[in-house]
């Protein structure tokens, strides 16, 4: 069974290898994510990450910290709110504060877990306010059995579409395709590597970016 899913993962990986040949830039983004529950309906997640570009030479772009809170409302659903602060390593560009509100529906079908997420972002950068409405469909699948136990691998994939609006600016659309693999190191700790291919403003001047996301996740 593991060999079958490994071959499936390699087959799905081929498009991303091809995408890497037609990108405008490759972005490397390591992150640390800490989550905890209060033994009720509330859950919380804190994350810190750094974004680096590799075009020409390796260059740090920014570091960001975010905090999210989610509340289970029943019927496999959660409501959440979050705030993020982004410190840019560019004196000519303002720092960013972002507020987010979201609805998530998660359901498991045997070993396959799927999730639908609707999110609304408000990005504040100097005197600019940008609104982004986002829909993401994601899934994860353990490579052994019906659940991911310690020392086991799992696959993850997602598809996300964004509509972006700002006063006195032309509206834009982004599209994101993600595929990754993770390993559950223990009951509290997992490591995840995800590649994301982004088409930014694809109805006009399209920027094609390949993100390499390396995440450490720890559950308290």
Image (spheres, rainbow, N blue to C red):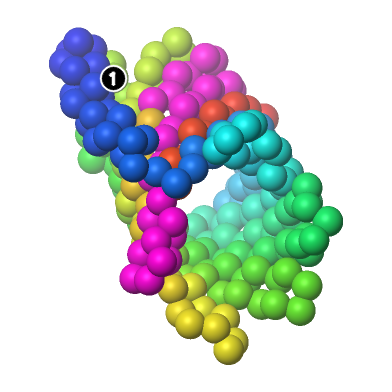
Instruction: Report the span colored magenta.
Output: 181-208
Residue at x-position 55% and y-position 38%: 55
Q: Left or right: where does residue 122 sit relative to residue 186?
A: right
Which residue appears at 73% of the width and 69% of the height? 125
Q: From this viewpoint, is residue 118 visible?
A: no
Residue 177 visible to the viewer: yes
Q: How many marks?
A: 1
Based on the picture, tell me whether residue 112 belongs to the magenta stretch. no
Q: Quadrant of the C terminus?
A: top right
With 84 as the anchor, is 103 left or right in this view? left
**Which residue is pictured at 59% across the width and 27% down the height?**
216
Picture coordinates of residue 205, whole percent (x, y): 41, 66
Q: Residue furthest right?
A: 91
72 or 51, which lies in front? Answer: 51
Q: Of helix, strand and loop, which mostly describes the magenta segment?
A: strand
For the N terminus, the image quarter is: top left
Image quadrant in which you'd find residue 130: bottom right
Please rate how many residues cluster around mark 1, counting C-alpha atoms within 10 Å: few if below 14, some from 14 to 19, many from 20.
Answer: many
Coordinates of residue 45 in the picture (x, y in percent): 65, 44
Look at the picture and state if 61 lies above or below 160.
Answer: above
| Residue receiving disc 1 | 143
- Residue nearer the viewer, 205 or 66: 205
Callout 1: helix, strand or loop? loop
Q: Position of residue 134 (x, y in %)?
A: 44, 65
Query: Magenta stretch: residue 189 in it?
Result: yes
Above or below, comparing residue 211 to residue 175 in the picture: above
- Among all residues in the image, which is located at the extreme bottom? 168
> Viewer-proximal residue, 110 or 155?
155
Q: Position of residue 212 (x, y in %)?
A: 49, 33
Q: Residue at x 64, y 31 (%)?
A: 58
Q: Is residue 21 left or right of residue 73?
A: left
User: Quadrant of residue 199 in the image?
Assistant: bottom left
């Amino acid at each position: 069974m593991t060999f079958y899913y490994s071959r499936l993962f390699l087959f799905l990986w081929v498009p991303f290898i091809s995408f890497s040949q037609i990108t405008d830039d490759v972005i490397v983004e390591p992150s640390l994510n800490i989550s905890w529950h209060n033994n009720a309906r509330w859950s919380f997640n804190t994350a810190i990450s750094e974004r680096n570009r590799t075009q020409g030479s390796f260059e740090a772009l920014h570091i960001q910290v975010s905090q999210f809170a989610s509340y289970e409302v029943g019927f496999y659903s959660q409501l959440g709110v979050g705030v993020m602060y982004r410190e840019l390593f560019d004196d000519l560009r303002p720092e960013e504060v972002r507020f987010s509100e979201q609805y998530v529906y998660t359901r498991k079908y045997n070993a396959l877990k799927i999730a639908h997420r609707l999110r609304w972002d408000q990005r504040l950068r100097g005197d600019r306010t940008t609104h982004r409405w986002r829909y993401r469909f994601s899934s994860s699948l353990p490579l052994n059995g019906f659940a991911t136990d310690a020392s086991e691998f799992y696959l993850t994939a997602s598809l996300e579409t964004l509509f972006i609006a700002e006063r006195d600016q032309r509206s834009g659309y982004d599209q994101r395709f993600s595929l990754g693999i993770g390993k559950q190191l223990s009951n509290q700790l997992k490591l995840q590597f995800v590649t994301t291919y982004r088409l930014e403003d694809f109805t006009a001047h399209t920027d094609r970016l390949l993100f390499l996301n390396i995440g450490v996740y720890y559950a308290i």
